[in-house]
Image (tube, helix red, strand yellow):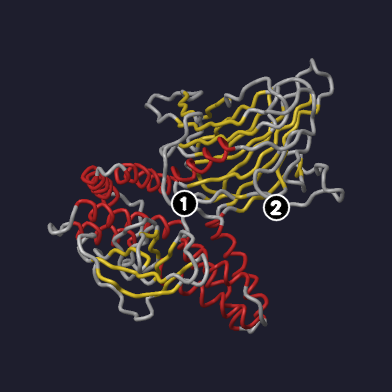
Amino acid sequence: MFKKKMQLRALIAPTLFVTLACAFQPAQAQEKTQFFFAEDVSVGPPRVNHVPRQATPKTKAAAEDFQDRIGGASSVSFENFGVDEDGSKLNAISDFHLEFSGGVTADLTGINGVGVVLDPSKTSWGNFPTHGKKFLSIMSKEEDPNADATAYATIKFSTPQAAFGFCATDIESNRLIIELLHTDGTTEKYTAPVTIPQNSGGCNFIGMINTSRPFAGVRFINAGKGKEGFGFDEMMIAEPKLVEIGAVIMECTGYYERGEYEKCVSHYEKTIESFLRSTKITQENRTRLELAIKETRNTSITAQTRCTILRSAFYAMQYSETCGGIVTTAISEASTFYQSKNYEGCWSSYEKYAYEMLQTSSISVVDRQRLEMALAYEGSWETRCTMMKQTFEYINTEIHNTSLFLQQSQSIALQWSRYFVVSMDVEQGRAIQIESSNDGGLTWTVNEKFTSTDTSHRYIDYSNDYMNSAHRIYRAQYVDSGYIKAQVYN
């Protein structure tokens, strides 16, 4: 799956931003849907179907940027769906039930089946998965090249979604038309601007956002003549409030990276005022925002530190909204198995929700590490279940601690910090000193000394001397010389 990047960046030049008028316009003005598109045009030879798989840098970059934009994206691939025994044919299955994180489900109808490509260097008639080994297919089957062969597939969500994105492969001669089914009953069509015609094996990313008029469903239309198949993979969704939070983080990150800290603070504060007037956020996140505003009223701290505090609060809010419900449900469901000493059932229940959390793009790096370690742990069912239980309970405590600011940056303001991650390779055997600052980086004090033993480092504050100031930041250096790129996480 696409992995959320530590730092947001602008969309690359070949990515298009498109807005189209709605197919039906009621009396009141409607917000136009914003569309995102990028393509890697086929470089395969003409009139060849089983072409080698090509690199897809534009598609992947656009998908990652879209994930950043919508914040807290939940995505699915199709690795759990069956395929024919020979591992290459499409199943004649038209209906699928998809499960996204956070309890969101979707029913997908009209799909021709699941395709599989085991060799990552190959395609199946030009189609291929962008993640794993499997993909979905929608195919027009009319053998007559002059006859209309338009095919349709529809995905309907259990709850309205403000964002939807996916990767598509092998669009050669037919057009891919997206019809949005808005919750207000209106529809909106978008024709993906794929280069037509092209040879087999191309790849595209297509995304759409509308926070005021969410999508109840989306219809895919394979429009054209003759026999033509499209592949689909890595579908991602986000609810309206997560899209709004993600948009704020992305815009303010731009200010922060350009050093425009006053603008960063101003935009965060205006947004917080809007959030606090609404009913869109939980009381827990309301408390986080109020605390962040209170902290930034300290006139002795710099604009950069104030901006960092506000960023921390928004990251924590995003994490709470995307993963809080998953963790609570996991603990509740698994506790029944644990109490009855059905440890295998307990572990299986936790396993399901662990993978669900790993699908979200807003999970913190350390919690991702915790879950991956718990999933890989070997031992009796009781010890594996116990480790999972402790992992989820710890994450639950973090998520619901309103005084805990989560952040993913090189120098951050952080409360209750315990983890220091050195993110670049460090020469083995060289001593590293961890320094801390209480004044936004004006002065530094050596906190601990470590000697590296490998190239992946997570340093824990064993002293339990938790910081009671949101203005503490860390950095790492070799003892003899040289700054080390590092990150602080909870």
The vertical placement of 67 against 367, above or below, is: above
Q: Nearer the viewer, residue 463 or 214?
A: 463
Q: Position of residue 400 (x, y in %)?
A: 38, 67
Residue 22, horizontal then vertical, whole percent: 48, 25
Picture coordinates of residue 373, whole percent (x, y): 57, 70
Say which element carries label 1.
loop
Q: Label 2 sits on what residue type? A: Glu
For the point 66% across and 29% down, which residue is it? 221
**In the visual, does 34 lie left or right of 382?**
left
Q: Is residue 97 left or right of residue 332?
A: right
Residue furthest toward the top?
146
Residue corresponding to mark 2: 79
Quarter of the image holding residue 465? bottom left
In this view, the residue in front, 276 or 114, is 114
Image disc number at residue 72:
1
How busy is the neighbourhood of tag 2: few (under 14 within 10 Å), some, or many (20 plus)? some
Provide the secondary structure element on which disc 2 rests. Answer: loop
- Give the image quarter of residue 475: bottom left
Q: Is residue 216 visible?
A: no
Q: Residue at x 65, y 20 (%)?
A: 196
Picture coordinates of residue 20 (x, y %)?
A: 47, 24
Amino acid type, residue under disc 1 in the picture: Gly
Instruction: Identify whether 226 is placed above or below 419.
Output: above
Front-most of residues 28 and 146:
146
**Residue 228: mark in rendering:** none
The residue sitting at the left extreme is: 299
